Image (cartoon, grey):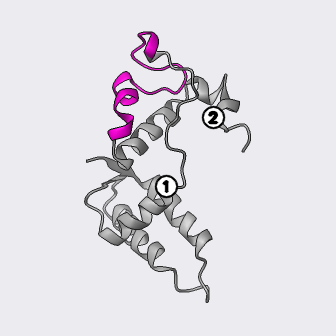
Amino acid sequence: MAALHITDIEAAINWWRARSPSIDGIVACPEVRALAEVYGLMVYQHEHEVDEDAMPPKAQDAWLAWYRTTPDAPCIAICSTSQGDDICKGCGRRFDEVQNWTVMTPGEKRVTWRRITMEGTAWRFNRYAERSGEAAK
């Protein structure tokens, strides 16, 4: 399906570490260990991405728990694709991404989020940042 970027795996690890800190400072919770195994293999193999369906079930479950805490759609209610643009000026998604968002997998959504964040040209990142909640953070 979609390739999860190593930064998403790292974010999930950090989320779990904050949520379930180590009692003794040595042994991590099972979710961190499952994600760390994937992360470690990615680093060892010099991979930046891992297929969301290729992750072991425990790591995938831990990643999905973190994913559910992230914002779903990047929409800021200024959709220029409805006016004929191929790429929305408001959120930065392509027309097909806007149309298929509800049927995309979590990994596909994260790929889109990563692309629009790295590009940083959508109005959600500058002109209308307050609509996205970015300014509140």
Secondary element under disc 1, as helix, strand or loop, is loop
In percent of width and height, residue 37 lies at 37, 72
Is the residue marked by circle 1 packed among few (<14), some (14-19), or many (20+) residues within 10 Å? few
Real-space Cα separation, disc 1 to disc 2, in angstroms: 17 Å
In the structure shown, which secondary structural element does the residue marked by tag 2 occupy?
Answer: helix
- Image coordinates of residue 81 in percent, x first then y, are 44, 17
**Residue found at the far right of this picture:** 136
Amino acid on which the number 1 mark rests in the picture: Arg
Q: Is residue 4 above or below residue 127?
A: below
What residue is disc 2 on? 132
Magenta residues span 82-103
Compared to residue 91, the image places residue 43 above or below, namely below
Q: Is residue 114 above or below residue 129?
A: below
Q: Which residue is mark 1?
A: 68
Q: What kind of residue is marked 2?
A: Ser
The picture places residue 47, in percent across and down from the top left corner, at: 33, 55
98 or 6: nearer the viewer: 98
